[in-house]
Image (cartoon, helix red, strand yellow):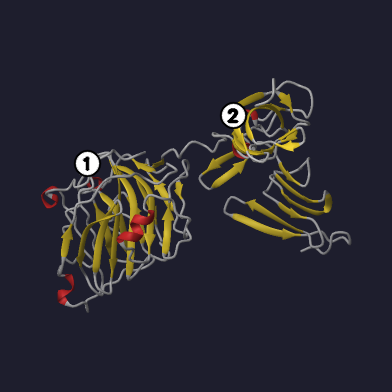
Amino acid sequence: MSLSNVASGLLAGLVEKARAFLKIVGPFPAVPAHAACVALAIATPFSLAGGPPPGGGGVALPDAGSRLIHTDVTGFPTTEITVEMWIRDLSGNADAAIFSYAAGAEDNQILLIGPQSLLVFKNNLPGVDTGVDLDGPGIGAWAHVSFSWRSIDGLLQVVVNGQIAFTTTHSVGLEFDDGGCLVLGEDQDSLCGGFQAVQAFIGEYLDVRLWSTFRSEAEIAADFDQRLTGSEAGLVSYWPMDEGVGSIAFDYAGTNNLSLVGNASHLPADEPVTNSGGFSYQGLLKDAGELFTGNADLRFGLFDTDSGGTALATVTLDAVPVAGGLFNTTLDFGDSQFDGSLRWLEIEALLQSGTGYETLTQRQAIGWTPQSVFAFTGTGGSGDPGSIWSEGALGLYYIARPLGIGTPSPTARLGVYSLGIPAGRFEAIDAPAGEFFSYGASPVALDSTNSGSGTTIGIRGSTNALFGTGV
């Protein structure tokens, strides 16, 4: 997912081509009458160079009725706000709703309409025509758009791909409300509802951010094409949308996970983690007991035993520079050679003064770095039908066999043992009633039983002297 290469200065005749507005709506009758007036409006050309942050992914909304939604937002900004997102318009609908936030009786506290127009509502005040056309280079191109506003002086700005596209002042003194409903892809005409097909956004989202600060052009430009950690100051919610599967877009900064509704679906993330490119290896090479300096031809063999056998794979590197005996190189035997089994490395060297390869003493056991990819993608050996770990909407899961910690023979779906001693045992029992047992100084068992009209949870314990007092 990369942007098409286009030149800067795309937006000559912006006002004629696009309709982008800002309206601010809310129950604040004490606001001065002049607050809605536009004191300054500046539209500037911007460049659509660059592309979405690395990692791939995104969420596709293919039709009307598809949306992302969170019904009770926690921590929504009230006096300063910045909304950032990568979007890809696939329909050219100038009335498509990109970002809709409603609270209480106000269905349009904020409404961004675009991408050919940008419409933000608060308190039914007049709109602002920004003249920003995100479809300038053509429908189907990715663009990063950011909307910022603050109450103290009404400063409003639109930044596209890290460059100021529009600035003005608007609606001094107004505030937004927390606890509302957030929707991406459709316009709310009532709280969490009232959607109309004519305002559906058909396209894709990626890396959506909600801040409680007014971010400057420089701040946005510094990281709009990079992934965040989720711990940045002022970041209320962060939806990278890189899950690749499932029905949730997780909030990495807060608790406002977005649900995928209708035919909304995750786009594939980047290829799974692999050993492509190999792993680093550093060695020490001596010639006749002295540290060698110069170039050496090196041949590395990968074995499944510490002696004998046949190499599983080999890597030959010519003219490897060696200084004071030390050399650094990268070895790539391919992902398929690392399946969780032990591996050893045999090294042969041909020095400048030599007449043939000489095998260095003793094979070396390979550590777990090259095996790390197997932790997610590997199979569990004979009889296992597929990968050990799978990825679902709520995270990783394992369903192939009972999982044991501290024991090779778990008797439940999850068995956790302390040094193999039953008295220090924790078990989660899968059948018949979803029981949970803890054995030790204070044993407790929790049973969940579905009676048909609800679920009952009981607590019980053993009453004998060995296990303690029951409940």
Residue 130 x/y as whole percent: 18, 57
Checking the image for residue 3, the label placed there is none
Query: Left or right: where does residue 356 sit relative to residue 72?
Result: right
Residue 304 x/y as whole percent: 73, 28
Q: Quadrant of residue 423?
A: bottom right
Between discs 1 and 2, the one toward the N terminus: 1
Identify whether 16 is placed above or below 231: above
Residue mark closest to the camera, 1 vs 2: 2
User: Which one is in front, 427 or 185?
Assistant: 185
Q: Is residue 266 something one can see in this rendering? A: yes
Q: Are marks 1 and 2 in contact (CB under 8 Å)?
A: no
Residue in the picture at 16% in, 54% down: 131
Checking the image for residue 319, the label placed there is 2
Checking the image for residue 137, the label placed there is 1
Residue type, mark 2 in image = Ala
Identify whether 138 is placed above or below 38: above
SS at mark 1? loop
Query: Left or right: where does residue 46 sit relative to residue 37?
Result: right
Quarter of the image with the C terminus is: bottom right
Residue located farthest toward the front when viewing the structure as drawn: 353
Q: Could you tell me how many numbered marks the image carries?
A: 2
Residue 365 x/y as whole percent: 74, 35
